[in-house]
Amino acid sequence: MAAMIGSGCRDSKKSADGNSKSDTEASIPVEVEAVRRGPIESTLRTFATLEAEQEVKVFARTANRVIELKVEEGDHVRRDDVLVRLDDANQKVAVAKAANSLDKSRQEFGRLEALHSQRLISDQAFADARFEVRQLELALEDAQRELDYTVIRAPITGTLTRRIVKLGDLVSANQHLFDLIDFTSTVARVYVPEKSLANLALGQAARVTATAVGDQAFTARVRRIAPVVDAKSGTVKVTIGFDDIGPLRPGMYVDVELILDTRADALLISKRALVLDGDQTYAFRLGADRRVERLLVEPRATDRLNVEPTSGFKEGDQVVIAGQTGLKNGAKVRLPGDPDPETEKKKDSASPAALSASRE
């Protein structure tokens, strides 16, 4: 009879769902981080492929054989530096012939000029002689130009990126010989949504990173802003120039961050705390009794690591940065270092008092 009474007493401690009333509510393990103050930049992220604004293909402007090759791929040259020399024997002969013809014509013109002054020849004969001299002067200029073309010079300052011609080659007029690029003219052309146009200005700072060269960020500036909006895409073309391109090269794919605004003392929430729900963003703030509150986060500014909320948070607030998946408003949580209720219950059940009570 006593055993039945004891059993009834123990059963009375259980609720209708079979759980002991002494069981604690299950808590979810999470990690938190304090909301703090610090600097933040409002940025616009986009991408581009680098290109050089000063990129020239060098062509031969006359025909002959290459007798001297002065440069190689990778060489840096200045404008008007000699790249290659062609055999100029034919061109020198042409210049000499043109000069001789001009000298003879000038002598003849001098004789006719004297006769014309004495009215011994007609005005037409004198005009024809003067025209002949001018024609031969132009012929000499053409011959001299052809001679000058045998020395091929750099049209811009830059780096030789491709050499097509070899020593001894017989080149023809308009043959492609070299590619020359001025790396300092490298730019990134990005397309910015028209709604951000009011936040853009010439000289505005930007950061450029390229996977090919690691995590290094390169300083850049807004060099030009297109004066019109593309009606099809609703974007504005912005040209980004560099203070120093370093290892960046034309053709590289890069990420571009336009710095729209900088705040030195902003309230910062780690992006690890953000939870997306549809088109809205939330964060869980730790409250009293280890319960969390789900709050809407409306960003005023964002960067890679943090977001500045417009309202709802204050410095020192603890927000959940890990374990928030599936977390509900008002849920009870457990922080690292807090006792685990399951472990505590096992300890209690293994205590001498509990064992004694179970034997009774």
Image (cartoon, grey):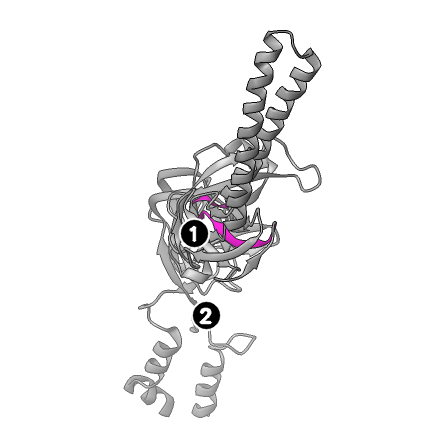
* Residue 322 rendering spot, x and y as whole percentages: 43, 63
Query: Type of residue at label 1?
Result: Thr
Sequence-wise first label, 1 or 2: 2
Q: State the mark number for residue 26.
A: 2
Indicate the position of residue 16 as horizontal and vertical percent values.
Answer: 56, 75
| Residue occupying the point 51% across, 53% down | 179
Residue 185 highlighted magenta (yes or no): yes
Image coordinates of residue 234 in percent, x first then y, are 66, 39
The numbered dot on residue 159 is: 1
Residue toward you, 319 or 182: 182
Can residue 186 be seen in this snapshot? yes
- In reply to whether residue 300 is colored magenta, the answer given is no
Q: Is residue 294 in view from this perspective? A: no
Callout 1 touching callout 2 (CB < 8 Å): no
Residue in the foreground of this view, choosing between 239 and 37: 239
Percent position (x, y) of residue 61?
57, 46
Residue at the (48%, 84%) spot, across then down? 8
